[in-house]
Amino acid sequence: MAKEFNKKFMHPTRRKLVDMVLTGGEYQKETQISFSGVDKKKIKREVGDKWTDDNGKSYEQLEAGKIETSELGDTMAEVRAYLDKLNTCKSDNCKTIKIGRVDKKLISKTGYCLHCLTLKEAQIKYDGLWKEYEDYKIYSNIISHGKDVIAQFQQAYRDAKQTYEVVQEDGKIESWSMERDVNELKAEIMIDITNFETEIEQVTKLRNEAYAKLKDKNYDLVRPLKD
Ligand SMILES: [Zn+2]
């Protein structure tokens, strides 16, 4: 599965930059005016302009204002790459000029805009492999969702305790116990985990069977198996 971009896990500075780029307007937006040379000539910066001042500091003009690229270059490159990816269809001969809401959604899911995705899927239908393709997609989703569920159950298993202590607002510690025996509960969770794993194993087998029929075609929409 492709790694999803998640702001939650970003460094605060980076998160702020992403917010800044995404929302734009809430931050200083005037075009940067800088003075250089003896004649104090006004330089009007356009979005995308890069320049170095007399002190050797490099800047880039963004819609939200200028940023110092020496410090934040990597971060901005990362943010830009992410934003570009959100709005760029993977297809080499994509003819879509205006990326709409549906396109964006599909690009984030499949990498392709609606038009290109339709063309790619038409080829699969034409090849008579639509059923296999759908199976591959559905089973892949089940596997990825199932793995998340298992991870949650494993967390619950690790966290389960007979007695919990909760710190109250006034600093007092309140403890409460579970009515059920924790070992009994943990045993149940473990059975659930095992059952889930068995099911996912079966689904994985079906997914691999579907993939085996598709792989020789090297469809862009069918990613090589990793798990
Ligand atoms: Zn496209």
Image (spheres, rainbow, N blue to C red):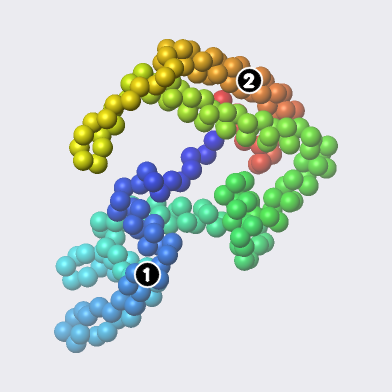
Residue where numbered disc 1 is placed: 26
How packed is label 1: few (under 14 Cα within 10 Å), some, or many (20 or more)? few
Q: Image height check: is 210 above or below 76?
A: above
Residue where numbered disc 2 is placed: 199
Q: Element under label 1? A: loop
In the image shown, does 222 or 199 lie closer to the viewer? 199
The quadrant the N terminus occupies is top right
At a point 63% along the width and 66% down the height, the residue shown is 97
User: Taking 93 as reference, is 59 left or right?
Assistant: left
Q: Image height check: is 118 above or below 54?
A: above
In the image shown, does 202 or 169 lie closer to the viewer? 169
Q: Element under label 2? A: helix
Q: Position of residue 106 (x, y in %)?
A: 63, 51
Q: Position of residue 96 (x, y in %)?
A: 65, 62
User: Taking 47 as reference, is 144 left or right?
Assistant: right
Q: Is any atom of residue 90 visible in this view? A: no
Confirm if mark 1 falls within 8 A of ligand 1: no
At a point 79% along the width and 38% down the height, the residue shown is 130
Q: Compute the Cα span from label 2 to label 1.
A: 49 Å
Give the residue type at disc 2. Glu
The disc at residue 130 is none
Q: Position of residue 226 (x, y in %)?
A: 56, 28
How packed is label 2: few (under 14 Cα within 10 Å), some, or many (20 or more)? some
Q: Image height check: is 187 above or below 146?
A: above
At a point 22% along the width and 70% down the height, the residue shown is 53
Give the residue type at disc 1. Glu
User: Taking 46 as reference, is 170 left or right?
Assistant: left
In the image shown, does 185 or 15 lie closer to the viewer? 185
Q: Earlier in the sequence, mark 2 or mark 1?
A: 1
Q: Is any atom of residue 98 visible in this view? A: yes
The quadrant the C terminus occupies is top right
